[in-house]
Image (cartoon, rainbow, N blue to C red):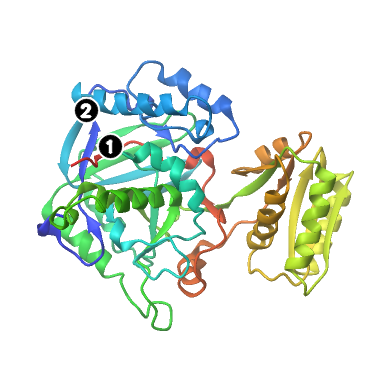
Amino acid sequence: MDPKFANNAGVCVPEIVFPAKGVDLTRWACVACDQYTSQPDYWQGCEAVVGDAPSTLRIMLPEIYLDKPGEEERIAAIRKAMDQYMKDGTLQNLGRGFMLTRRTVDGKTRTGLIVALDLECYDYNKGSTTLIRATEGTIVERIPPRLRIRDGAPLELPHIIVLIDDEKKTVIEPLYAAVRNTEKTYDFELMQKGGHIEGWFIDGEQMIENAIAAIEGLIDPNKYGREMAPLLFAMGDGNHSFATAKANWEKLKASLPEDQRENHPARYALVELENVHDDGIVFEPIHRVIFNVSTKKFLADLKAKLAQQNPGGIVDIQLFESERRFNRCFERAVAEGGHVIPVIIQGKRGFIAVKKPTAQLEVGTLQAALDVVLKATKGAVIDYIHGEDVVNDLGSKFGNIGFLLPSMDKSALFKTVVFDGALPRKTFSMGEAHEKRYYLECRNIAK
């Protein structure tokens, strides 16, 4: 951390690496690797757009290819491309500063601030009281395959979005007001229906100091009514990528002498900060699709497990031939209370009804049972899907089951995590797949 900008919030002012002038940014910027994991056509479309142009598609691994044949060769190609882009001038160092970014997609505009956060201020384990926390359960088994990509890589490029609870809009919004009429670093259309994005590089010392002071001002142990360990940064998107950066740092730190640990670039991770109160942020539900199962048996096992985990009430699963009958019965079930979760299976719609559920949220009720039944069902695979239409399509195929979940109130996020801990994993998504953060800015994490 630059001593000039020392602070108590775990914020580091990064050296941002960015494509040189002349690089086609529409072909450079690519959506987060953890999207479209069951839709190879999307990634083939990206290949068609990019062609042989410089692109972040060449320096990240879409998770559709994770743990698949050829993964080792793909990772080797990523390393080669990173080295090439740094050597041939494709990437240039803009210097130390923040990047203010403004993204408009599907009629919604949100503003973010690219900073680096100290991984020493983060703990994803249950019961964590660090300044930076996971908002959902972290699956530690998901870290090692992602660590293979980050371990030894000279560059990081973030799709991580970290939220701040800044109701008075003291951090990001004043920066935008100050730079909106100044020269932009970028202003272009994102590929594959990603919308429009613009950015301003902020390297003025006073602006940086003011922003950091405003962030420190959000640290308040009594913010939510009683004294609790303050939560300053809550993971919005990219929780497992941030956890992977932490694992990489812990591994690297163990090999470093004490005097090299404080300022090693890998101690920090590049993220986009966004204010949860930004009007452009909408929490979308993340649905589930189960693949490769005997649907009748899977539903029977799921019902039994739900009944076991929710002993205080009735569990029912119903399927309907007609949409009209489904709608009528669904509305009645919702009115009766409890958790009611729509199901799509081989062209039929239905729902799971759990009266007096143990969990607070529908996603908690469903996921707790799915975790057990999936483990006991040979060949079964789960995917987490953004968008009802995709769930309806995939869930209707033979051997698949789709589950639709409701959205969460974003204003309750910080208080819920402070008092109750991390939410069930994949509880919410900040927009649908094409609204996710695109890789754009980079940072050197090699010493």
Q: Where is residue 152 in the image (x, y as percent from the top left)?
A: 29, 37
Residue at point 25%, 61% (across, down): 10
Q: Quadrant of the N terminus?
A: bottom left
In this view, which residue lies farthest toward the bottom? 226
* Residue 313 in the image: above or below residue 3: below
Of callouts 2 and 1, which one flags the residue occurring earlier in the amino acid sequence?
2
Label 2 neighbour load within 10 Å: few <14, some 14-19, many 20+: some
Which residue lies under the disc numbered 1?
155
Inspect the image, locate mark 2, and give the three-letter code of the amino acid beneath it: Met
Find disc 2 in the rendering and name its residue.
86
Q: Residue at x 65, y 54 (%)?
A: 371
In the picture, measured across the screen, residue 182 lies left or right of residue 398, that is: left
Q: The C terminus appears in which quarter of the rendering?
A: top left
Q: Is mark 2 on a helix, strand or loop?
A: helix
Number of numbered callouts drawn: 2
Query: Amino acid under label 1?
Result: Leu
Residue 113 visible from this viewpoint = no
Up-down: is 231 above or below 294?
below
Q: Is residue 136 visible?
A: yes
Image-quadrant location for residue 144: top left
